[in-house]
Amino acid sequence: MAIRFLALFQQCGFDAIYNLGTSISDTGNSAIDNPSIWQAMFPYGKTINEATGRPSDGLLIIDYIARSADLPLVVPYKNSSALHLSTSRGVNFAYSGAPALSEEALAKKNITLDWAKPTLSVQLGWLDDYFKGYCNNVKGDCKEAVSSSLFMINFGTNDYGYAFSQNHNIEEIKKNGLVSDVVEAIKQALQKIISQGARKVLVFGVALDGCRPISVTMESANKSATYDRFGCVKDNNDFCNYHNVLLQEGLKELREQHPDVQIVYGDLYNAMQSILDNSQSLGFKSLTEACCDVDVEIKKKAVLYKDKLCGAHGTIVCPKPEEYVFWDNGHCTQKANEQLADWIIQDIFPKFQCNA
């Protein structure tokens, strides 16, 4: 599958990108705040010869979307010096580990966070703060000024990941309303950014999380776990689809309320499925294993979770990341991100009515 569609967004006339999200689109915020985290250091960035704080060996989906729109890579909000230089081309507020729900809301469902992470609500606050300064420098109506911008949002995976890691099973999560609460939080965030002038919005669903190395490892001791022909955990992927169905229902409601706003669904689930289905022709040889991981024997002896992750002592990096879908235990390689972006751009381009 050739990369054919990465330049399509040039026809859409997006003049900036504003992104709220998690690690799949974190281009450096968490690393700026915490320079000792693994993704702030080599071997992260191996393919581009620079550790930029992205949780990959190179670029992310958001980077390819920016390139497709003929825009510079979106500057992390925490990079104040670079942010000053690009105030009119967008800002990235995404932060690794960020949940959609607040710490208090998660606690009510017996889900705890090991440290406070910038939730969706916190990132919306950052967006507010940014626009206060930005709008002061805009001649005319600020809402009109941002109407040609592309707003993106991706949340959900971390809320569920924290629940699973604390032994909440899928049926329990469905019954306690976590998914509906996450979807509602996303809907409220969309209402907020629409009120600030957003007219073009891309909302990502969750991908095939059952294919992530961490999911496969966590289920390895579960004798009742079932796997698809690619080695992915079927129940986890079915749960991701459950979230995506509820999210799309919520987006349909918002479209009816805001017919003048283009609210487009970013189908990461089927984008990843396309990679799996076409893995051989794409050159992928490993679908559910991490290119960057810690030696098995060292991992067994590690006490702290972070010492079991790519970047820790005993890290082994595969010689050819381009043959792996996953870079570490939860994030894609640059090549996989490029393929995901290509599929998504092709899928959503007509929905933004760029030729209208």
Image (cartoon, helix red, strand yellow):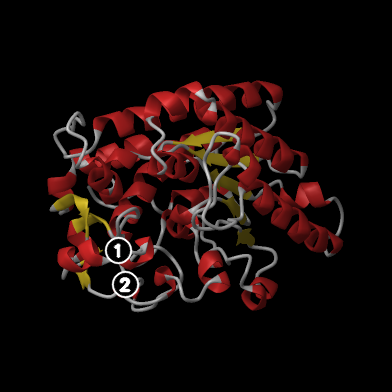
Q: Nearer the viewer, residue 172 or 228?
A: 172
Q: Is residue 5 visible?
A: no
Q: The residue under label 2 is which amino acid type?
A: Ala
Is 187 placed above or below 118 here? Answer: above
| Mark 1 surroundings: few (<14), some (14-19) or many (≥20) residues within 10 A | many
The image position of residue 116, as x and y in percent, is 60, 56
Q: Is residue 24 above or below residue 206?
A: below
Q: Is residue 173 rendered to the left or right of residue 103?
A: left
Q: Mark 2: which secondary structure?
A: loop
Q: Which mark is residue 312?
A: 2
Is label 1 in a helix, a strand or a loop? helix
The image position of residue 133, as x and y in percent, is 81, 63
Horizontal relation, residue 243 to residue 72: left or right: left
**Which residue is at the front of the view, 324 or 181?**
181
The quarter holding residue 47 reads bottom left
Residue type at mark 1? Lys
Residue 167 lies in quadrant: top left
Q: Residue at x 52, y 25 (%)?
A: 176
| Numbered circle sitting on residue 85 | none
Q: CA distance from mark 2 to mark 1?
A: 7 Å
Point out the image quarter for the C terminus.
top right
Q: In the rendering, at what x and y percent does residue 52 appear? A: 45, 73
Contact between marks 2 and 1 (CB within 8 A): the answer is: yes
Packing grade of label 2 (10 A; few <14, some 14-19, many >=20) is some
Identified at 24% across, 35% down, the residue is 233
Q: Is 353 left or right of 58, judged from the image as shown?
A: right
**Residue placed under numbered mark 1 in the picture:** 308
- The percent coordinates of residue 105 (x first, y second) are 63, 38
> In the rendered view, would you say 85 is above or below 190?
below
Drawn side of residue 181 relative to residue 159, left or right = right
